[in-house]
Amino acid sequence: MKGHPFVRYATGLIGGILLYVYGPHWSGIPLLLAGVGGTAYLVGFWRNRQRTVKPLQTAQGMGAWLLLLSLGWCITYQRTAANRPDNISHVADTLRAYEGVVVAQPEERAKTYRVELALRRGAWAGSWHPLSGRVIVYLDKLNESSTDSAGPGASTVSRPRYGEVWLVNGAPRPIDPPLNPGEFNYKRYLSYRNIYHQQYLRPYQRQILALAPSSRLTAWASAVNNWADSVFTHQIGAGARAEYGIVNAMILGVRDDLDMDLYRAYASAGAVHILSVSGMHVGILFAVLTFLLSFLLKRPKGKVLMAVLQLLILWFYALVTGLSPPVLRSAGMFTVLIIAGASGRSQLLANTLGASAFFILCYDPYALFSAGFQLSYLAVAGIGAWQTSLYQSLTTRGWLLDKLWQITAVALVAQLITFPLGVYYFHQFPTYFLLANPVVMLLSFLLLPLAMVILAVSWIPFVNTLVGWVLWAVAWLLNRAVEGVGQLPGAIWEGLWLSEETMVFVYAVILCGAALLLTRRRTYLWATWASAGCLAGLLLWDSYGQQHQRRLAVHFLPHRTAVSLTEGHGSTLLTDADMAGDPRSYEFYLKNTFGQWGVTNLTLASTRSDASPAVRAYRQTPDYALWVWHGKTILLVNRLSGRHQWRLPAVIDYLIIRRNALRDWNELTGRVVARTIIFDDSNKTPLTDKLLADAHRLGIACYSVRQMGAYVQELR
């Protein structure tokens, strides 16, 4: 890495960031690293200060790398909001009210507005105190006082604006950790953005005090974003919701008007990545600008003029997106590339990527844990390393076929290098990505520049109409092509699960295999075989465990009952939730659990009736249901108010209390004796908290999925 200094700098900084994340309380470690690294660097420098030709100094290089480790730890510590003494996470008393400012573009949901507030001060202990931190607020659209006059479902609350200062009554609550196995860790995801609390608000709980944006630049970007939305609405919005939605998603990063069926079609076709503004969009715009402005290279100082125009348009696009973090990161990366090209310096892609990553992580060290950041850098690095070799391995005749093969080679390399990480995060793989990606890339190369053109000519009559129609036509073609691929049988391979260890070996096979093809060295052959052998061993071990698994689980499902009985690759889910009418609850809370367990055959059964032949109800009454499974008795109690005598076994293995059936422990006396007592989330939280406190005092062992997460018991 002698010719790639910024790669070394970036790896050192990344090491320091990881060191802080896994050891935030090891405050002595960065001091030790800085001391050892500084000493090694100074000793090496002193020894060679009078030499004309400097020898390679391993100690000096390692010293600098240790200094970067220490720098990464310190930057991450400084950028972690919880380390501030006035952060909301340190408030021990009950927060009665707080004041905050809207610091991001609000997102519109079906029933709420999702708003991000930066706190300024809070009221507790009878007075106001300085307060910092960020809170996610879900503001109800419907004002209770106007329900009758507004009609059902009417939006009576205006959309919040960036820069509004709110006075909010009540206290936000800490974000819950994942409560089911394999569930998406929303708490960790938001903590990387320095957000630790959230709150659901009724309109009467907040008061707008003023409009005072915390950043004029961000306020300007928000205004540009709103103006661009109004242009797209005027030119293509009327009667073309699908096309307007796709343009809004690709250009502005707003999915409010995107139909869910259309979104699923993009996911099935492997093109869902274009629906979020990201580095790919900046890369497409950069490639188009490089092609369109290449004639300037023949003129005096044309290289500088071309660089200025590219930078202006790229950063204008960043403003149009509302300074979206992924676009900012990619714009920074291409800025380094453009400046290096304009200055006449040799452009080494690895060093350019290292430089952009280094500066981005200095500003935002937690960007390292963003899936977009990881996938973008992996894709660009893979394309730069392998696309040329793959493209040159096949010769085509004709300009059109050559360009099609060039785009296909890019798609192949990008998919190869990113698919393990994509499966790790999203647990699915698009089967027909080779059909969809060339078409999607080609139409994206048309749609993005056209969107910029429509913004530029929006004030010119007739011209704006013509360009708007062409933009609509391209968006229509894109939707039709994606829907066609997404409707093919077996378009998406779902239920995939990669552990971190498995993903590492998949990447080892890919990298060693690629090195073997490029270099033909026997060393890489043995490395590929070894990695493949370890990968096969891990997969076989996981498969064996899944085939012989047998477990009972009481899952966390908000305000619902969800009990699963899993054997091998099949599972029966006993629930009172309408999974068909509310698929999002299943996808967010339970889908990853069954994917992690390798369940390929899931049967739904109602808790109110014996709906599944896999599980027989031994006795069913309005008060309770007794289930028998592999010799284990499972009792679901609906109510305890009836005076009927319960005919039960002497001892129940698993007693599941639901729907506030138990209000006092004495109610169980004379009715049931259970080895394990479990409260699901259909019970009210205050009641469950009271019963848990009483159980602790009485010495009764019990379990609550709300407080402790899903109850999972292996049965052998």
Image: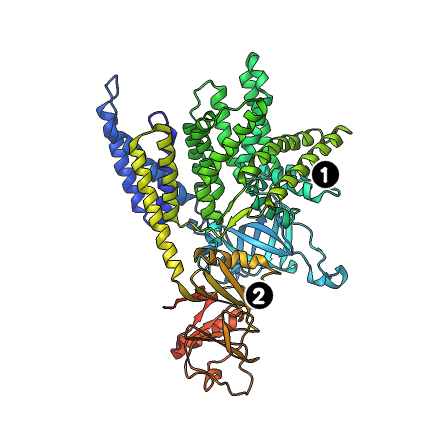
State the residue lying farthest toward the top.
300
At horizontal 36% and vertical 38% (from top left) the residue drawn is 71
Answer whether labels 2 and 1 touch (C-beta < 8 Å).
no
Q: Residues within 10 Å of mark 2 (few under 14, many from 20)?
A: some
Considering only vertical position in the picture, is 289 above or below 23?
A: above
Q: Residues within 10 Å of mark 1 (few under 14, many from 20)?
A: many
The amino acid on which the numbered mark 1 sits, given as a three-letter code, is Ile
Spot occupied by residue 496 in the image (x, y as percentages of width and height): 46, 50
In what element is the residue under mark 1? helix
At horizontal 56% and vertical 31% (from top left) the residue drawn is 284
> Observer-nearest residue: 716 or 489?
489
* Residue matched to label 1: 236
Answer yes or no: is residue 100 visible. yes
Q: Quadrant of the C terminus?
A: bottom left
The amino acid on which the numbered mark 2 sits, given as a three-letter code, is Ala
Answer yes or no: is residue 177 visible. no
At horizontal 71% and vertical 37% (from top left) the residue drawn is 231
> Observer-nearest residue: 301 or 675?
675
* Residue matched to label 2: 577
Horizontal relation, residue 254 to residue 633: left or right: right
Q: Which of the 4 image quarters holds residue 201? A: bottom right
Considering only vertical position in the picture, is 170 above or below 68?
A: below
> Observer-nearest residue: 102 or 629?
629
Please count the marks in the image: 2
